[in-house]
Image (tube, rainbow, N blue to C red):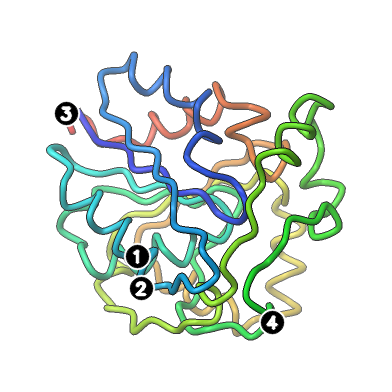
């Protein structure tokens, strides 16, 4: 048995994983879907504390899953608690530097469809789009700006990248355009890939398939 700790990215909360929970639960695993603080003064340290508390409180080896902007949280937690985490999964995102980013100014990042590519919006039904618009919460921008000193043990935690809003061709283009951004990715010693063409949020648009992929990397007997 394993404990899945699920971490959302911008705008959504723990309930965005609701459709993924039943298959994981039916397979005999514990599941913790976190909802991170959203007040404008929230820092990255505040977010990371929620994640590491959940990991430390787990009674079984942890599969730490991060969606989108939670890549920063997953990699940082891997460095803080490498012995607690059996495998990490990056959902439509990549292991990324934990250095701060000045991309987002102001206190919060409001929800905006224009921040998503057409590929990242595919398969979303009208009902799902309405749900996202009605439940989206502005994301604290300071979380993205705060740097975090990464413990290099993070690179030795097995990792899975699940590409949904991007594909292998896009990945190659990104590597050519921003080679320095792939320095972290290239240092992960045990990196696997899975492709699930759908929206930026496969937990909404293809939850059964996402759960299947996650179960495939769960340590046997874990």
Identify the residue at horizontal 69%, vertical 61% (top origin).
171
Label 1 and label 2: CA atoms lie apart by 5 Å
Q: Residues within 10 Å of mark 4 (few under 14, many from 20)?
A: few
Label 3 and label 1: CA atoms lie apart by 28 Å
Which tag, 4 or 3, sits closer to the chain's start? 4
Identify the residue at horizontal 20%, vertical 63% (top origin).
81
Helix, strand or loop status at disc 3: loop
The numbered disc on residue 45 is 2
Q: Are marks 1 and 2 in contact (CB under 8 Å)?
A: yes
Label 4 and label 1: CA atoms lie apart by 21 Å
Judged by depth in the image, the label closer to the viewer, 3 or 1, is: 1
Which tag, 3 or 1, sits closer to the chain's start? 1
Judge whether 30 appears above or below 32 on screen: above
Q: Quadrant of the C terminus?
A: top left
Residue 221, image x, y percentages: 16, 28
Q: Which residue is mark 3?
A: 221
Helix, strand or loop status at disc 4: loop
Q: Which residue is mark 1?
A: 48
Judged by depth in the image, the label closer to the viewer, 3 or 2, is: 2
* Number of disc labels: 4
Nearer to me, 69 or 212:
69
Q: Are marks 2 and 4 in contact (CB under 8 Å)?
A: no
Q: Residues within 10 Å of mark 1 (few under 14, many from 20)?
A: many
């Amino acid at each position: 048995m394993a404990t899945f700790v699920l971490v959302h990215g911008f705008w959504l909360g723990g309930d965005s994983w609701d459709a993924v929970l039943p298959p994981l639960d039916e397979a005999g695993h514990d599941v913790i879907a976190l909802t991170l603080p959203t007040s404008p003064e929230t820092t990255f340290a505040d977010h990371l504390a929620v994640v590491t508390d959940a990991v430390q409180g787990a009674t079984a080896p942890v599969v730490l899953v991060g969606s989108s902007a939670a890549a920063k949280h997953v990699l940082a937690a891997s460095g803080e608690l490498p012995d607690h985490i059996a495998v990490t999964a990056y959902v439509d995102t990549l292991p990324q530097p934990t250095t701060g980013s000045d991309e987002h100014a102001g206190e919060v990042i409001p929800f905006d469809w224009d921040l998503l590519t057409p590929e990242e919006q595919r398969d979303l039904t009208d009902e799902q789009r309405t749900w996202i618009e009605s439940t989206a919460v502005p994301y604290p921008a300071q979380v993205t700006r705060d740097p975090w000193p990464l413990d290099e043990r993070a690179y030795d935690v097995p990792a899975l990248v699940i590409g949904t809003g991007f594909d292998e061709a896009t990945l190659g283009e990104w590597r050519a355009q921003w080679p320095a951004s792939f320095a972290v990715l290239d240092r992960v010693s045990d990196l696997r890939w899975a492709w699930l063409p759908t929206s930026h949020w496969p937990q909404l648009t293809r939850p059964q398939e996402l759960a299947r992929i996650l179960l495939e990397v769960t340590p046997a007997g874990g």
